[in-house]
Image (cartoon, grey):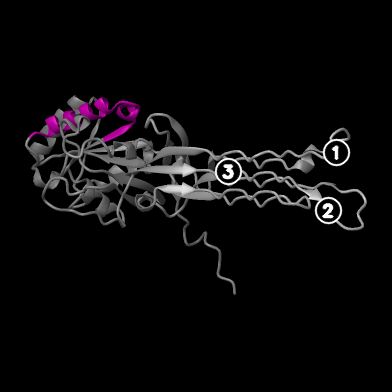
Amino acid sequence: MKFLDLAKVYTRSGSGGNGCVSFRREKFVEFGGPDGGDGGRGGDVIIEAVEGLNTLIDFRYQQHFFAKNGRPGEGRARTGESGDDIVLRVPVGTEIIDEDEETLIADMTEVGQQFVLAKGGNGGFGNLHFKSATNQAPRRANSGQEGIERTIWLRLKLIADAGLLGMPNAGKSTFLAATSNARPKIADYPFTTLVPNLGVVGVDGVEFVVADIPGLIEGASEGRGLGDMFLGHVERCAVLLHLVDGSGEDPIADYETIIGELEAYGGELADKPRVTVLNKIDALDDEERGFFKEELEEASGGPVMLMSGVSGEGVQDVLRALRAEIDDNRLRYKKSQEEEEPWQP
């Protein structure tokens, strides 16, 4: 399945049906009268967050969504049938943005959450509605209200508990593959990861979701490389895991480059809790490990952990550090076998 996190959609709610002008004419009925029914209501445009989706690829092949119009009223006081609603099913974490690409209309953050984007038009009144003691034979009816046309943008921001940051080839995909069942592409050239990947990681009886995004380079905020177009996917994370390639030419410069791009991106991303890790320590000797760790701690102003995603050294300690930063309400506790209910026929 291809990954798509931005889509433009054209929607229109249903128009209401027209009211009916009709009079009762039956043999053996001494007094007739108006009996025109009201028009039916137009359908709504509804957006619903559903489980099991993690891409907006469906909206690449269909961009126009129109709800059904209401049916007009009929004689014998029959109200027209209401138009069917149309429901746009989106992944959890989708933002609904106005056509100006700036105004946030709604944020779909929970499974089952619904938002009425455009209400259908009301049906018009038939002439029966206007009958009164002083107007016993009205010959007027209302037209139904027109539907509402709206052009919106759907922007997906994946919901994860921890997000991976780093330069290309910093070992983010290797870490995700080593700690979860996710199988991202891993190779020895830059920009192996082209789209975000999610993996469920377990440690000490709890699970949380980790998001891996394509690597950043200097000037990503200005569009260099893949730019910062995927940084939105880690905006919802509780903690960021910043991996620094210990086998690179200048790990300190790599660290400062990523921090600079976070600050250039703006928002609250640069202020989120971060766990800084010197990765690929299997390629370093003890002296190099100590030197780069001290330099990174001085540059970051905080502790730096050592890890190797290939050999597994320090991986569990990093997972425990991430768990400590994630809110308790985000953690999903595993059920032990003793707690499971016994099987019953």
User: Residue 15 bears which disc, if any?
Assistant: 3
Determine the CA span between mark 3 and mark 2. Answer: 30 Å
Q: Position of residue 81 (x, y in %)?
A: 66, 52
Q: Earlier in the sequence, mark 2 or mark 1?
A: 2
Tell me the kind of residue under disc 1. Answer: Gln
Label 2's element? loop
Looking at the rendering, in which quadrant would you find the N terminus? bottom left
- Which residue is the site of mark 1? 136
Image depth: mark 3 or mark 2 in front: 2
Q: Is residue 83 above or below residue 141?
A: below
What amino acid is at disc 2?
Answer: Arg
Q: Where residue 40 appears, x then y in whole percent?
A: 66, 47
Q: What SS does tag 3 mark?
A: loop
* Residue stretch in magenta: 250-275
Q: Residue at x 73, y 38 (%)?
A: 140
**Label 2 sits on residue:** 25
